[in-house]
Image (cartoon, rainbow, N blue to C red):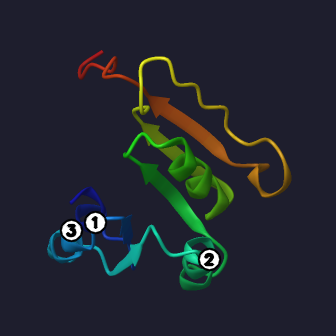
Amino acid sequence: MAAKLAGPPRSSASTIVKSKFALARELGCTHTLSARDDQLVTAVQELTSGGVDYAFEVSGNRGAMTIAFDFTRRSGEVVCMGLESLDARFVPPHSGGSRGKGYSGHFHGEWQCGR
């Protein structure tokens, strides 16, 4: 919904639950992609001429976080929310295509509005 209000020329959603695609389109996504697609990174890079400016990863899955870095363009921003368990750790990739990318995250609900 935020992307629809911000008015980008295109926005996309990726999920393993294909039944969510209709809702994503209703809320403003112009493209929906299966997160199970082996060619997801390539598809996103082709769709966006090199990668997204902003990636929001909200599943808390470390593999999905890494994929978000992979399809974000240089100088883009990756925002991750949550981790799969209380003892899980995630280290953003620091090699190859991850250079020049920003990273921020909010884990386990510690963020509070109005701070």
Frontmost residue, 87 versus 6: 87
Which comes sooner in the sequence, label 2 or label 3? 3
**What's the residue type where badge 2 is placed?**
Gln
Q: Position of residue 91 (x, y in %)?
A: 67, 32
Q: Are marks 2 and 1 in contact (CB under 8 Å)?
A: no
Can you tell which quarter of the image residue 42 is in? Answer: bottom right
Q: Could you say whether the residue bearing mark 2 is in a helix, strand or loop? A: helix
| Kind of residue at badge 3 | Lys
Q: Position of residue 33 (x, y in %)?
A: 40, 76
Q: Quadrant of residue 96?
A: bottom right
Image vertical order of residue 70 relative to residue 99, above or below = below
Report the mark closest to the observer, 2 or 3. 3
Q: CA distance from mark 2 to mark 3?
A: 22 Å
**Depth-wise, is mark 3 or mark 1 nearer the camera?**
1
Q: Which residue is mark 2?
A: 45
Which residue is rendered at x = 50% and y = 75% of the image?
37
Q: Are marks 3 and 1 in contact (CB under 8 Å)?
A: yes
Mark 1 residue crowding within 10 angstroms, few (<14) / some (14–19) / many (20+): few
Query: Counting residues from the N terminus, which is met first, the one under dot 2 or under dot 1?
Result: 1
Of the pair 90 and 54, the residue shown nearer to us: 90
Which residue is tagged 3? 20
Element at label 1 = loop
Residue 17: give its label. 1
Residue 14 is situated, as x and y percent measured from the top left of the image, at 39, 67
Which quadrant of the figure contains the N terminus?
bottom left
User: What is the distance, in whole Å, between disc 2 and disc 1 at their CAs?
Assistant: 21 Å
Task: Tell me which residue sits at (58%, 74%) in the image.
Answer: 38
Q: Quadrant where the C terminus lies?
A: top left
Identify residue type, mark 1: Val
